[in-house]
Image (cartoon, rainbow, N blue to C red):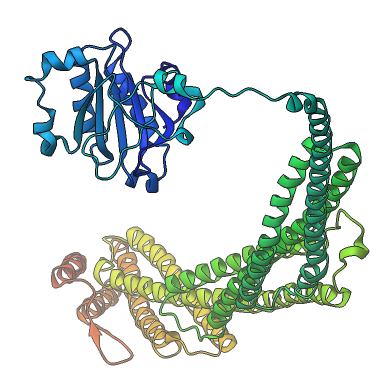
Amino acid sequence: MEANSILPILKKKLAFLSGGKDRRSGLILTIPLNSDQTSMEELSATLDYLLSIPSEKCKTRGFTVIVDGRRSQWNIVKTVVLMLQNVIPAEVSLVCVVKPDEFWDKKVTHFCFWKEKDRLGFEVSPLSQHTHTHTHTHTHTESFKNSLFYLCRSADCALLPSFDPETVLQSAPAWCPMEEELLAQPQVMKLLDSLREQYTKYQELCRQRSKRAQLDEVHAKVLQVVNWLQGPGSELLKTHQAIGDSIRAAQALQQKHEEIESQHSEWFAVYMELNQQIAALLSAGEEEEVVELKALQQQLSDVCYRQASQLETRQNVLQAAQIFHSTTQELSQQLDGLLGMLCADVSPADGASIQQNLKLLEEKLQTVESGLGSLRQKGTVLLEQMCTPWPWPLEETESPAGEQQDNVQHIQAVMEEMELRKQRCEDMVDVRRLKMLQMVQLFKCEEDALQAVEWLSELLDALLKTHVRLGDDSQETKTMLDKHKKFVDVAQSTYDYGRQLLQATVVLCQSLRCTTRSSGDTLPRLNRVWKQFSVTADERQQRLELALNFHTVAERLVCVEAEALDDVDTLGKTLLDRISMPVIFPDGSEQFFGSPTDTAAAAEGVRERLLLVEERRLQLQEARLGNDETAL
C-alpha cells in the first residue's frame, strides 16, 4: 500500500508506531481514540499501512497495542478491540485499554475481555490512568512525547502497567548547556561549514568520476561493436558472396546467411542499448561531453547502418538467386518434357489424334517460351541486385572481384544455355510440326480416296438400279444417251480424283517412311469398282445405241419396204435379248439392270414396237396380194 493514497487519513494520526518497544523487543502500536474523529474504516486503513512497514522478523516478536480510550466512549473501545481480532490477530500479543479509575469502578462487573482470550487470540488488559509503571527512556520518540507513553513489560508480568506520558516527561531531569559549550559553538559552526564545503566538493568529484566512468564504458562498448562489425562481421559478408548453382545450393547459402544475421543481431541489440545510454547522457551532459557523445553516436550509427544495409543487400541477392534457380529448374523440366515428346515416335490412329498432339506440342512450346521470358526477367533482376552500387566508398566494403565476376558469368551462361536448348527444341518442333501436317494431309488423302471409292460405288449402284429405261422413241433415247455420257464423265472424274489422292498418299508415305492403308486396300477397291462401272456403263451405252437404232428404223415404217422390216424385226429381237441378259463383271460376277419389273417394262416397250412392225408387214403383204389379183 502506498502512503500517498491514504495521506489525508495518516495525517489524522488515528494510530502510529512511535518506535518504542516492550520488554520482549516487540513494537508498540498506539491508538489514541477520539469520539468526534474516529472512523473505523479510516482506522482499519491506517492499521493496514502501519503493519506493512515493519519487517517479517519484527512482526514475529508480536505487537503491544495501547488503546487510549480516555476521550472516547466505551462502545468505540470495544469495537476497536474486536476489530484488532480481524486485522492483526496473529501479530498482537497484548492489548492495553486505558480508562480513568472511576470508569473501571463502574464497569468492573460488566468487563469480560479476560474471559474471551481464547476467542480473541490475544490478552486484553484494562489499565487506569494513574497506575504506576516504569519505562526505558532510550525508547522514547521525540515526536510523540506529548501524545502517549512507551512501556516495557517483563516476561513474567501478567499485565502491562499503564502510565501517564506527561508525568514521565515532567519527572525527567532538565538539560541546560554549559558556558564552555556556548563559547565553542562558533568554531563548531565554522568547522561544520568547512565540512559541508568539502563534502560538496567530494560529491562533485564523485559525480564527475562516475560520469567519466560511464563515458569510458560507453566508449569501450562502442569500439567493441565497431571493431566487430568492421572486422569479423565484414569478413563474414566478404567471404560469403556466392549465389550457388542450384536451388538447393541457394537454400544452403540462405541458411548460412541467416546464421550470419543472427550473429549481427546480437551486436545490433548492443547498439540499441548503447544508443539509449548515449541519449540519456546527452540529455544531462555538458558541452564537451555532448560533442564527444555525438561523435561516438554518429560513428556507431554509420557502421551499424552500413552493415545492416550490406546484410539487406545480401538477403535480396540470395532471394533473387533462389527465384532465378527455381525458374531455371522449372524451365529445364519443361524443356525435358518437350524434348521427350519430340523424341517419341508418332503413330496416331487418325487425323483428330494428330491434331490433338500438334495442339499439345504448341502449348508446350508456348509454355517454354513463357518460362524463358520469365528466366530472362529473373536473371536481369538478379544481375541488378548484384551490381547495385553501394551508398558509401566502395573500397571500404568491396567484395572479391573474382567471385562477383564468376557469379555474373554463371548467370549469363545459364541463360545462354537455356536459350540454346529452347532454340534446338524449336527446330525440332518445326520438323515435328511439318511431319504432323504431312500426316494430317496423308490421313485426309486416305479419307478422300475412300470417299471417292464410296462415290464411285454409289454411281455404279445408281447405274444398275435406276438406269433401266431405254426410251419410248428415238428422241427420248437420244436424250437418255446424252445423260448417260455425262454420268460416265462424272464417274470418270471421281475415279481420276481418287487415283490422284492415292498417288499423293504414296508420296507422303515415302516422305514419312511409313505404310498406309491405301497401298493395300483402297487402290484395289477403287480399280475394281471402276472396272465394274466401266463394264456396266459400256453395256448401258450399247443398249441405248441399239434402242436408238431400233426406234429410228421403227419410226420410218411408213416408207420402209418389206425387205427392211426384217432388219427391224431382227434389231428388236436382239434388243430384247440384250435387255434380258445380265452384266458380267471382270471378276465373273453378274448383275442385272434394275429389278425384274423394270426389265419387263423396258421389254414391253420394245415388244409394242415389234407388234407395229408386224402389222406393217401384214399390211404390205395384203397390199401386194391385192396388186397381184388386179394384175390377173
Q: Return the x and y of residue 495 as percentages of the image width and height.
A: 45, 76
Of residues 449 and 246, the one drawn nearer to the viewer in this rendering = 246
Residue under the image location 41 percent in, 40 percent down: 54
The residue positioned farthest toward the left in the image shown: 109
Residue under the image location 38 percent in, 76 percent down: 453
Q: Is residue 444 left or right of residue 68?
A: right
* Image quarter in which the N terminus is found: top left
Query: Please, is residue 178 above or below residue 588 in the view?
Result: above
Q: Return the x and y of residue 168 as percentages of the image width and height.
A: 41, 23
Residue under the image location 48 percent in, 36 percent down: 138
Q: Is residue 120 left or right of residue 6?
A: left
Query: Please, is residue 546 above or below residue 49 in the view?
Result: below
Q: How many labels were placed on the picture?
A: 0
Q: Report if residue 621 is visible in the image.
A: no
Of residues 239 and 304, the one drawn nearer to the viewer in this rendering = 304
* Image quarter in which the C terminus is found: bottom left
